[in-house]
Amino acid sequence: MKNVFYGLVLVLGIPLSGQAQSVNLKPVWETDTTLRTPESVLFYAKQQVLYVSCINGQAIPENHGSYIAKVGLDGRVIQLKFSDSLNVTKGMGILGDKLYVTELTQVAEIALATGQVLNRYPIEGAQFLNDIAVDSVKNILYLTDSKESKVWALAYGKAKLVAAGSPLKGTNGLLVEGNQLLIGNGDGSLLRLNPVTKQVQTVANVGHSSSIDGIVSLGKGAYLINEVEGKLWQLRANGTIELKLDSADQQIKTADTDYNSTTGLLFVPTLFHNTLRAYQVR
């Protein structure tokens, strides 16, 4: 396990007052490279572990070697292939005692106790399912399809289209907040969707064409949003945006992040760099 990141640029903001205060990110640990093409990380507080979905190759229908790893909060791989023989695994979510993960055209339901695939739920017309966000109150899984620019809802095994068309474009990252959905667009914009009224608002735009993958809440209207190209931004409650991490120059892409609000640790998969990184948010 490596403890330092060579060549990573840390862009630290100047602290401001109140809701506009900047946060700093300090590298804590990095896993070894046994995590092959890690696309998404999910912190599970009940077990105090991380689940990491690993594409393990190309994002093509023929790839059935994807897997989900279980990683400790110290960065050590506990179980490399907790669940195996999956198809291009990406976003994950937990409901009850089951872990759900997107495959290309369907959602796999996995027993948390064993890693066994219990069911698969095909999504009609899906081409590239990506992220999952969970509404644990209504027992709904929300899904993005990046190629179709759509948002789906999956409840009790039945899928329903929630939104499609402009301004949705290359829909990727998702976050449930109350009765609203935050959506990371493929054009670098962050959207807010009301799944009932279908009203969509633009929350922010980082000004780049790279897809927004990870969205985590820091509370009080502040977020960390991550672009696939390797840039991570802080969106403050006052609407201002500040670059926090930049690994694009090292050609290290970053994907679907997660956050432990109790310890202030941010977890970042590095895709083709084949590691998971942890940062202390201060």
Image: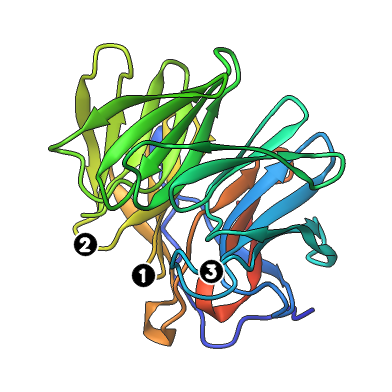
Dots 1 and 2: beta carbons under 8 Å? yes
Q: Name the residue under label 3.
A: 63
- State the CA–CA distance, disc 1 to disc 2: 10 Å
The part of the image, by quadrant, that contains residue 237 is top left
Q: Can residue 32 be seen in this view?
A: yes
Q: Eyeballing the image, is 193 above or below 31?
A: above
Viewer-side residue, 234 vs 70: 70
The secondary element bearing badge 1 is classed as loop
Viewer-side residue, 19 vs 59: 59
Callout 2, which amino acid? His
Task: Give coordinates of residue 199: x percent, y percent.
Answer: 21, 19
Dots 2 and 3: beta carbons under 8 Å? no
- State the CA–CA distance, disc 1 to disc 3: 23 Å
> What residue appears at the point 50 percent right and 54 percent down from the top-left corner?
256
> What residue appears at the point 78 percent right and 56 percent down from the top-left corner?
70
Q: How crowded is mark 2: few (under 14 residues within 10 Å), some or many (20 or more)?
A: few
> Which label was assigned to residue 208?
2
Callout 1, which amino acid? Glu
Q: Can residue 281 be seen in this view?
A: no
Task: Give coordinates of residue 12: x percent, y percent.
Answer: 46, 64
The secondary element bearing badge 3 is classed as loop
Q: Eyeballing the image, is 21 above or below 3?
A: above
Dot 1 or dot 2: first in sequence order is: 2
Q: Eyeballing the image, is 162 above or below 256?
A: above
Q: Name the residue under label 1.
A: 229
The part of the image, by quadrant, that contains residue 231 is bottom left
